[in-house]
Image: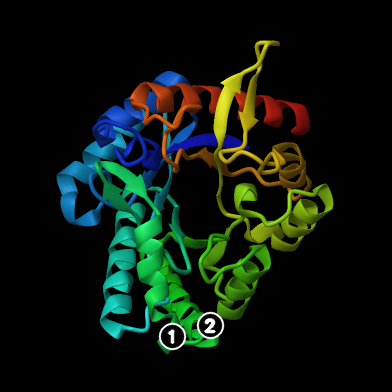
Amino acid sequence: MKVGLYSITFLGVWYDGPAKTLSEFMQTAARMGYDGVEFDGKRPHANPMDLNCAQRKEIVKEAADLGLEIACVASNNDFASPVPEHRECQLLMVKEQCRLCGELGGGVVRLFAAWPGVTLIHGVGSYEFARAGWHAFDGCVTREERWNMVRDGLAEAAEFAKEFGVTVALQNHHPLVRHWKDMYDLVEEVNSPHLKCVLDVPMMISQDDAFIREAALTVGARQSISHFGGEFRRGEDGKAFCKPVHWGNAPINYPAFVKAMKEIDYKGFVNFEYCHPALNEKHEHQGIEWVESNAQLALEFMREQIATYYK
């Protein structure tokens, strides 16, 4: 299993400070020792509108020169809006992200079923307001109707993937998707070889060994890419460890997940993403150095997990 770095980490959303450029992000990933990178498919990183043919070729060249594999382009799509114009705009963006991914040699475009988005409050990202906006339609559309709209959107996206020689992959991420089985059922209903799964253990509603193993064995060969996150620190023994983002949450069961990935013979990427407000113990916003430290420790942590269970 390979370890990648997802560019949302340095998009200038979750810490106090500007985004890294795409080039700076790739240089950071290479310096830290990551195997590859995942590009967020929006500004200021990899929005297809902003990258002409020459720029795309330069990205491919720079990644190769740095020894990085381009693992994925991440979409931030919402196929669950009851407004047709909204869904059509989302589909057009996903089509162009599939085109971009194919030209970059990325292989996978990560999809959401429904993504509310984020807002910037005093320059720092927040989920609260965008989520409230997404739920504003709850009174005029049923969950079943939204499910069907998402399934239809995924089917169209799979055809885009086929056209551009890539795979689209659905993440087990809310809203609409409540747990890994919802993600799996949507992929099964579309029934396309070009639509696969993104099973992420931090998003699971249970961290029990058996629950994680069941999810992994069910997804099996459909597993396409994965992510991990959290807050990472160095312990008294000198080793990196992961602590829950929110006090009182159960620790993310990465050992069980890595063991399960080994059991299904998964050889793809697991990519680190820092996608929550960068706050210290006093709830003070932190700068980019805080996130860089987390990214470095996260790599050490995941490498140790892989070394332990991928024997």
Label pair 1/2, CB-CB below 8 angstroms: no
Question: Image quadrant of residue 182?
Answer: bottom right
Would residue 163 be seen by someone viewing this image from the given angle? no
In the foreground, 208 or 247 = 247
Question: Can you say which quadrant of the picture contains the C terminus?
Answer: top right
The answer to whether 34 is drawn above or below residue 54 in the figure is above
Kind of residue sitting beneath label 2 = Arg
Which residue occupies the extreme top position in the image?
Answer: 237
In x, y percent, where is residue 117? 36, 59
- Total numbered badges shown on the rendered structure: 2
In x, y percent, where is residue 180? 65, 63
User: Which disc number belongs to residue 139?
Assistant: 1
- Report crowding for label 2: few under 14, some 14 to 19, many 20 or more residues within 10 A (C-alpha): few
In the foreground, 217 or 104 = 217
Kind of residue sitting beneath label 1 = Gly
Q: What residue appears at the point 28 percent right and 52 percent down from the top-left corner?
A: 42
In the foreground, 147 or 97 = 147
- Report crowding for label 1: few under 14, some 14 to 19, many 20 or more residues within 10 A (C-alpha): few
In x, y percent, where is residue 137? 39, 80
Q: What residue appears at the point 66 percent right and 43 percent down from the top-left corner?
A: 249
Judge left or right: residue 199 versus residue 265.
left
Q: What residue appears at the point 54 percent right and 60 percent down from the top-left corner?
A: 173
Instruction: Give the residue pinned by disc 2.
Output: 143
Question: Can you say which quadrant of the picture contains the N terminus?
Answer: top right
Q: How is the image coloured?
A: rainbow
Judge left or right: residue 31 versus residue 93.
right
